[in-house]
Image: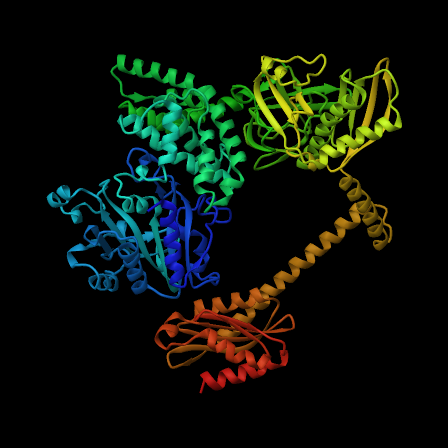
Amino acid sequence: MEAKIIRKTFIEFFESKKHQYVPSAPIVVKNDPTLMFTNAGMNQFKDAFLGNEIAKFPRVANSQKCLRVSGKHNDLEEVGVDTYHHTMFEMLGNWSFGDYFKKDAIHWAWELLTEVYGLDKERLYVSVFEGDQGDNLEMDREAYELWKEIVPEDRIIMGSKKDNFWEMGDTGPCGPCSEIHIDLRSEEERNTVPGKDLVNNDHEQVIEIWNLVFMQFNRLADGSLKNLPAKHVDTGMGFERLVRAIQHKQSNYDTDLFAPFLKALEQKSGKTYGQDTQTDIAFRVIVDHIRAISFTIADGQLPSNNKAGYVIRRILRRAVRYGYTFLGFQEPFLYSLCGLIADNFGDIFPEVRQQEEFISKVILEEETSFLRTLDNGLKRLDQIKKELAEQNETVISGQTAFELYDTFGFPLDLTSLIARENGLSLDEKGFAAEMEKQKNRSRAASEQETGDWVLVHEDTGVEFIGYDFLEAFSHILKYRVVKAKKGESYQVVLDKTPFYAESGGQVGDTGWLISETEKIRVTDTKKENDLIVHLVDKLPQNPEARFSAEVSRERRKLTMNNHTATHLLQSALREVLGDHIQQRGSLVNDQLLRFDFSHFSKMTEKEILKVEQIVNEKIRENIHLSEQRNVPIEEAKKQGATALFGEKYGDFVRVITFDPKFSVELCGGTHVPYTSQIGLFKIISEGSISSGVRRIEAITSVKAEEYLRSQEHLVKEIQEILKNPKDLRQAVESLIAERNDLRKEIEALHAEKAGNVKQELLKSVTQTAGKSVVIAKVALPHADALKKLAFELKNELEKAFVILAADVAGKPQIAVILDEALVADEKLDAGQIVRDLAKEIQGGGGGQPFFATAGGKKIEGLDQVVEKAKAQFLT
């Protein structure tokens, strides 16, 4: 059975059990401070488990992209070394939110594995939680009894808290779990050693494939456990391991999930997988890591030196290093595998297909950058190993590890990995001490001048990434003060920059340098030889800080519009006026384009209109940018690329093409991805500037013009509304400030009122039949306040039974919330209750058994809601 069919079968099976299929959440976590990456299928449902929100569906199934390379769940060091751990993997899962629990979860898992997938029952083992005294938790007797109905007792294994109590992290939803393991060994091996003895003992052929987690608790920051509002099921089955079991393979990497990637690597490297242990590890590392890298980039996380970005950079460099050392790749190679990612995963995860080109470019840039220093770094490591051997030492000093980090860009974990491969260890404390020394040196260096420059960090060269990115995390290498009659100005040089420096007629970028403590405006960017210099409006308070270098996006976009239009203009001029047309100068900024060209007569109106027509036709054709970097100059010339007169070119050039039959130029500037982005081209002047040289000025994007006109009209309207103040900005800011102050005041009053309402309701609690009953009419500012109030009452009451008839900003709403014990023991249903009460306000509603809401039209019916509820539940 093919992997795609196995995944499809899983989804269809649970859809037949009335589960809703939901797409995978992003692998990069955005709004959860406790996680950088999605490390389990349940992450996107965390709020539903905690009771902070009501699940959209009571039963859900999906295939979730997961990444485990940091924090509590970190499999990075095992990846490639063994055959069943991965960085990025798919987690097949089914969930129940307060609906079914252990019985159905266990029976459906067994049905799917044995009856649908046809796995051998004799090879399967299950485990249950044995209890834990530290958490005062008893054995999961319920799960044990359920498994006894399915498998012989000698196949049920008692598991410790480590193996059979699942926790997402240090805090959060958790609970006992029941794992299903499979023994993939040969019959001979199975007869020699029982599979039961190898479960959870890191045996490569006796592996866990499915974990059924019974979410019952929330782990608090102090380590204690609190019961969740409802009991849930959260299962996770490693897709890669399942495919291996069904396809009867000895390794995850032998399945059709990885086979195309291994084959491609074999063809590229000339080596064969399966013939050498170390080479095989390299194969596995690369085919695993390319998935993790591609999926995280597709979900918006670029490699960087910060947090999640640094994790991805580490993974990428680990793959590059293995390919370089063991497969002989001296040039970038990872990026070429992106097409296979799109082909093999684009159906279930369309983002990797849609962003294939972008992902490939990002990886190529990262590979290129790292390979520049990897060769020298590895040579230095070889020298270090020889020196240690001569001295009969086995520990790489912290100072040496820091040299590799500072000079060659080796992350500490990469040096540590190479050390282990060679039987060496690493002085990590010494490395940390060297890092601190560097900070001290930077502080001292910032007080000393070398020529006009003040050194901040070791100058290892400047990397320009502005063709692909408009933001980068950067450090200041050096800065200087420039004194002039108008006062002092300041210039800084960054180690990595997305800012385009003025060149070839295109103006330099502007934007911001942003650290944790300050925001500095970049007013211009220029070149000084090959050095990219940023003009800033002030010096940073802490030059050592890491800055987010952010280009002004709108200004860059408008500049690109005009630059690409300049290329189209030159080709149109040659078509209309003749091949003698040569560029003699240009200016490209966000306002206009100015193009100087060789021609000996004034252009006629007809010629100008024809040029405009051709350029606008090319804009409407939506021609895609073809960009070639590092093209040998002779090859570029053979392509017919137009070079600028007087421009100095190196041996390798950048070729910009918009339709190879129309515009092919050597250019270092920035351009639009498609000509349609330009919108519209209009020549506003044509004239002579010197003998044989004429100048055209033009503008682009009629939408920009329309926008400016509409803004002008809007400003006039605002002026009239505000009685034509002398300082319009100040008047508007005053209004905004006044509004914000009033909003804060109102929110504070609402919070105070809601708190008072809760306290009054707690005083009115009626104890009846073992329930804490609150039935009342309240007035609240918004629906969220009603939900919040209901849950707060439930959390503070023992066996809460709460019905709130609420006047929410003049609209009638009802909320019913019940303790889970009442739902389970007394068969109460909040949804049924609220639907019945909603009749009094001419409305309807529903929800889950423990919480439901309703809205209506008849505000005066709220009193009847209270009376009816009291008559039903307090008598």
- Which residue is outermost to the left? 192
Horizontally, is 11 left or right of 733 in the view?
left
Q: Residue 688 in the image: state x and y as whole percent.
A: 87, 19
The foreground one among 798 and 605 is: 605
**Residue 240: quadrant of the picture:** top left
Q: Which residue is depicted at the point 87% across and 28% down? A: 606
Q: Is residue 342 visible?
A: yes
Q: Which residue is depicted at the point 14% across and 42% down? A: 189
The foreground one among 195 and 511 is: 195
Q: Residue 647 in the image: state x and y as whole percent.
A: 69, 14
Q: Quadrant of the C terminus?
A: bottom left
**Residue 751: quadrant of the picture:** bottom right
Horizontally, is 601 left or right of 837 in the view?
right
Horizontally, is 689 left or right of 763 in the view?
right
Q: Which residue is depicted at the point 18% across and 55% down? A: 155
Query: Above or below — where is 863 with respect to 130?
Result: below
Query: Above or below — where is 189 with respect to 178?
Result: above
Horizontally, is 677 left or right of 598 in the view?
left
Q: Residue 272 in the image: state x and y as whole percent.
A: 31, 26
Q: Residue 785 in the image: state x and y as whole percent.
A: 56, 66
* Colour mapping: rainbow
Q: Is residue 169 visible?
A: no
Q: How many marks?
A: 0
